[in-house]
Image (cartoon, helix red, strand yellow):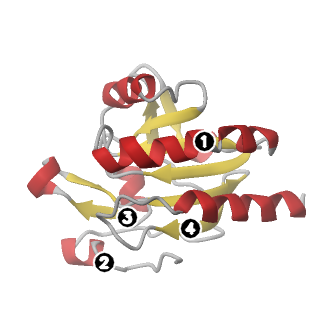
């Protein structure tokens, strides 16, 4: 399923969005990896590189911890063979993301990126109202295939609360197609 600009839930939130689409560069926002001392500019993260960036609702949430991270870790060797990097983004603080990377054995394999103010998430028009349970707005579950900083595909999980992560399979097919182009 491809993301459509202006689709719920952000319309319901009344949020103003930039709404990035296929062919656009990653947004010019600062993310953090592991600590507040390690800022990462999103629009420079994949410069000269290719890979996948996937978003989760929250670090340490059951579905994200028990399904999403293990699914991507299981594909790590395949990504490495294809010379593709993997990044995970969540509307969390950098320390939580660093602790989550350690607890899931993702350190050194998946770049665990914090979007503490949700700026990247809003730029992607992927904000999800989770205030009732998680205390703040979070991100929908989605993946991006990125090549040289440009979004090649956007895959959105159609069930915002589902635990199954089917994005890995779809993403790998898209990465294989990228490999055929180069």
* 3 or 2: tag closer to the N-terminus: 2
- Residue 91 in the image: above or below residue 167: above
Q: Residues within 10 Å of mark 2 (few under 14, many from 20)?
A: few
- Residue 88 in the image: above or below residue 14: above
Residue assigned mark 3: 126
Residue assigned mark 2: 8
Residue 126 x, y percent position in the rendering: 37, 64
Q: Is residue 85 left or right of residue 27?
A: right
**Label 4, label 2: how far apart the Cα atoms are:** 16 Å
**Where is the C terminus found, in terms of image quarters?**
bottom right
Can you see residue 42? no
Can you see residue 130? yes
* 2 or 1: tag closer to the N-terminus: 2
**Label 1, label 4: how far apart the Cα atoms are:** 21 Å
* 3 or 4: tag closer to the N-terminus: 3
Q: Is residue 14 left or right of residue 3?
A: left
Residue 124 x, y percent position in the rendering: 44, 63
């Amino acid at each position: 399923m491809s993301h459509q600009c202006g689709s719920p839930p952000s319309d319901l939130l009344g949020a103003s969005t930039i709404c990035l689409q296929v062919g656009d560069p990653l947004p010019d926002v600062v993310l953090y990896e592991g600590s507040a001392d390690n800022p990462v500019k999103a629009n420079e993260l994949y410069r000269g590189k290719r890979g996948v960036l996937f978003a989760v609702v929250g670090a340490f949430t059951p579905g994200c911890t028990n399904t999403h991270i293990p699914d991507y870790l299981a594909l790590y060797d395949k990504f490495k063979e294809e010379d593709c990097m993997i990044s995970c983004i969540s509307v969390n603080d950098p320390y939580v993301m660093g602790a989550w990377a350690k607890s899931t054995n993702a350190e050194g394999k998946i770049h665990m990126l914090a979007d503490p103010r949700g700026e990247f998430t809003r730029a992607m028009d992927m904000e999800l109202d989770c205030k009732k349970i998680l205390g703040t707005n979070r991100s929908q579950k989605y993946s991006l295939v990125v090549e040289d900083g440009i979004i090649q595909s956007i895959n959105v999980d159609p069930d915002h609360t589902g635990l199954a992560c089917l994005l890995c399979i779809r993403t790998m097919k898209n990465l294989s197609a990228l490999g055929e182009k180069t």
